[in-house]
Image: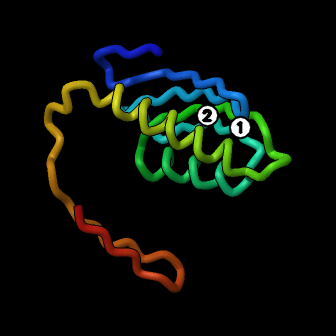
Amino acid sequence: MTVNSTRTATIERKTGESNITIKVDLDGTGISDINTPNGFMNHMLDALARHGSIDLSVIASGDTESGPHHIAEDTAIVLGRCIDQALGERRGIVRMGHAFVPLDEALTMCAV
């Protein structure tokens, strides 16, 4: 695990089902390098990086024979830990927000 004061983190996780390495830069420009065996997950992680203006590198491999859930779960665990580490002391974070996002035929609303 690597963390520094520029809101970046790198974490690796190896289990019996998966091998995950994620690098995140929360103050990036939306550049992504995503490589998992799940095309939809690749698409969603790329969208997270692009629309969140974060730089994200994800390399994930492992058991796909029993289903994609092992890699998806472990990737989510590592991504959450990376974001947690990169946020550090969380200075300057606003504790509430809202968004309305029109996507094709749907309107997504979120309040936190």
Image point (64%, 29%), residue name: 20
Q: Position of residue 3 (x, y in %)?
A: 38, 16
Residue count near mark 2 (Cα–Cα under 10 Å), binned few <14, some 14–19, many ≥20: many
For label 1, the residue is 35
**In the depicted structure, whether residue 23 falls above or below residue 80:** above
Q: Position of residue 12 (x, y in %)?
A: 57, 22
Q: CB of mark 1 within 8 Å of CB of mark 2?
A: yes
Which three-letter amino acid code belongs to the residue tagged 2? Val
N-term mark: 1 or 2: 1
Q: Classify residue 44 as left or right of residue 2.
A: right
In the picture as drawn, the residue positioned furthest to the right comes out as 65
For label 2, the residue is 58
Image point (41%, 80%), residue name: 107
Q: Classify residue 71 as left or right of residue 88.
A: right
Image point (45%, 53%), residue name: 51
Task: Using the image as rendered, state which of residue 27 and residue 8 is in the foreground.
Answer: 8
Provide the secondary structure element on which disc 2 rests. Answer: strand
Task: Using the image as rendered, state which of residue 79 and residue 73 is in the foreground.
Answer: 73
**In the depicted structure, whether residue 98 falls above or below residue 22:** below
Q: Position of residue 101 (x, y in %)?
A: 38, 72
Give the position of the C terminus as an image quadrant: bottom left
Image point (72%, 41%), residue name: 36
**In the depicted structure, whether residue 110 falls above or below residue 38:** below
Provide the secondary structure element on which disc 1 rests. Answer: strand
